[in-house]
Image (tube, helix red, strand yellow):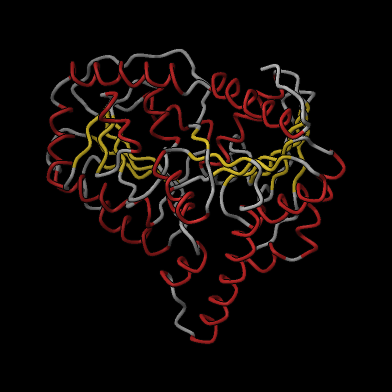
């Protein structure tokens, strides 16, 4: 198969921030290329050049532009479609409701290629993504705000039209799948994420318990809930580490102000991708505070490294509870109690960590995901060509 992936950044590059979607594409393109498939990766927010790690993988970077209107302009869209035309893939894979969706749809429609589109968060299954964002963060200038609203409405319309043309739609969980069916009339396949599973390094018992929070510092991740947790447990021997890019000025200032008064609190900031595993290896407990997500890469990283999870109100597809690799708290009081209780119980941490590792190995090994996607892609290509699949 010839596969093209359209993503934003190459997470391994330490100079750029990265989202979960980019992490997943990073793993997928390498595994497909390792198996000998011809793979093209187009990156739309990558600053530095990338040396492909496999000879069957080629990487192209689009011009860096900012703002919805610039990403929807024909000149920028044409870069993606021209790159795809030069490669002529059987399959074009793209995650999330983005301007990139429009270019992928246009190419696949004109060239009879299979457009594989994936929802990358629960919000992706809801209509009017950009309009909702603009209204949540209004500009004080009414003329500028009106222009932003109009721009968002145009973008939402074009992007939603584009994703409806996808020949294959994949959701991360059943909730996302239900949203896509209800709001867009889609019939999604559910396929989770995939990760490289390194050997497990077990953490020895220690009196100094490390509690980790790792995510991009944005409102949906609710970082202030972690700060409140640290405040509630101030005076205990726990160490708190908060890591993640902090582009939101208001959140950053409040976090810096409140954590400056907390003993045992380490504010790391942006962490290069290749360093994030080290944070998990040093952690005893991982906390999750996001208000709305699919299945974050950080939850899987915690499982891979045998770190128990304490999540505030969020349990994607009931996986944490079902598989027993963490605790889901329904309130801040429960959240603090769960962290304190795990900190005092090494055996409980070890058992939850063991269950998390087993869960990751059995369901989220990147090799298993690529096996599944390969079968799905080949079956759909065979169906389109009117032949019987051999898979």
Residue ID at (14%, 33%): 340
Residue nearer the viewer, 278 or 345:
345
Split into 4 quadrants, where in the image is the N terminus? top right
Tally of marks: 0
Residue ID at (27%, 27%): 322
Residue ID at (55%, 75%): 148
Q: Is residue 74 above or below residue 235?
A: below
Split into 4 quadrants, where in the image is the C terminus? top right
Q: Residue furthest right?
A: 86
Q: Is residue 353 above or below residue 296?
A: above
Q: Is residue 195 above or below residue 60?
A: above
Residue nearer the viewer, 2 or 44:
2
Residue ID at (56%, 70%): 152
Point out residue 155 in the picture as x, y percentages from the top left corner. 61, 66
Point out residue 291 in the picture as x, y percentages from the top left corner. 33, 50
Residue nearer the viewer, 11 or 326:
326
Answer with the quarter of the image where residue 289 lies: top left
Point out residue 185 in the picture as x, y percentages from the top left corner. 52, 52
Answer with the quarter of the image where residue 263 lies: top left
Point out residue 271 in the picture as x, y percentages from the top left corner. 48, 40
């Amino acid at each position: 198969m010839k596969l093209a992936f359209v993503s934003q950044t190459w997470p391994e590059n330490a100079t750029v921030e990265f989202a979960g979607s980019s992490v997943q594409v990073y793993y997928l393109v390498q595994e497909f290329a390792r198996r000998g498939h011809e793979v093209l990766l187009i990156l739309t927010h990558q600053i530095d050049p990338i040396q492909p790690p496999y000879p069957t993988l080629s990487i192209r970077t689009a011009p860096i532009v900012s703002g919805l209107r610039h990403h929807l302009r024909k000149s920028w869209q044409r870069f993606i479609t021209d790159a795809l035309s030069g490669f002529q893939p059987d399959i074009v894979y793209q995650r999330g409701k983005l301007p990139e969706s429009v270019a992928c749809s246009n190419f696949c429609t004109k060239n009879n290629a299979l457009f594989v589109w994936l929802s990358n968060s629960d919000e992706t299954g809801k209509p009017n993504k950009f309009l909702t964002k603009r209204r949540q963060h209004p500009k004080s200038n009414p003329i500028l705000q009106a222009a932003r609203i109009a721009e968002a409405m145009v973008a939402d319309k074009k992007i939603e039209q584009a994703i409806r043309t996808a020949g294959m739609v994949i959701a991360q969980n059943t909730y996302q799948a239900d949203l896509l069916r209800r709001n867009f009339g889609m019939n999604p396949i559910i396929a989770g994420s995939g990760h490289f599973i390194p050997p497990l390094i077990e953490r020895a018992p220690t009196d100094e318990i490390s509690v980790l929070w790792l995510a991009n510092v944005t409102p949906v991740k609710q970082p202030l809930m972690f700060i409140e947790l640290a405040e509630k447990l101030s005076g205990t021997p726990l160490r708190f580490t908060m890591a993640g890019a902090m582009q939101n000025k208001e959140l950053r200032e409040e976090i810096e102000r409140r954590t400056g008064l907390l003993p045992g609190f380490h504010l790391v900031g942006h962490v290069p991708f290749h360093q994030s595993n080290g944070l998990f290896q040093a952690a005893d407990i991982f906390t999750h505070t996001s208000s709305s997500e699919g299945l974050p890469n950080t939850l899987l990283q915690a499982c891979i490294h045998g770190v128990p999870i304490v999540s505030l109100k969020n349990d994607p597809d009931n996986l944490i509870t079902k598989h027993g690799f963490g605790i889901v708290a329904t309130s801040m009081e429960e959240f603090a109690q769960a962290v304190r209780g795990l900190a005092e119980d090494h055996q409980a941490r070890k058992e939850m960590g063991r269950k998390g590792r087993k869960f990751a190995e059995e369901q989220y090994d990147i090799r298993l995901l690529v096996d599944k996607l390969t079968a799905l892609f080949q079956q759909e290509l065979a169906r389109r060509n009117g032949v019987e699949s051999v898979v």
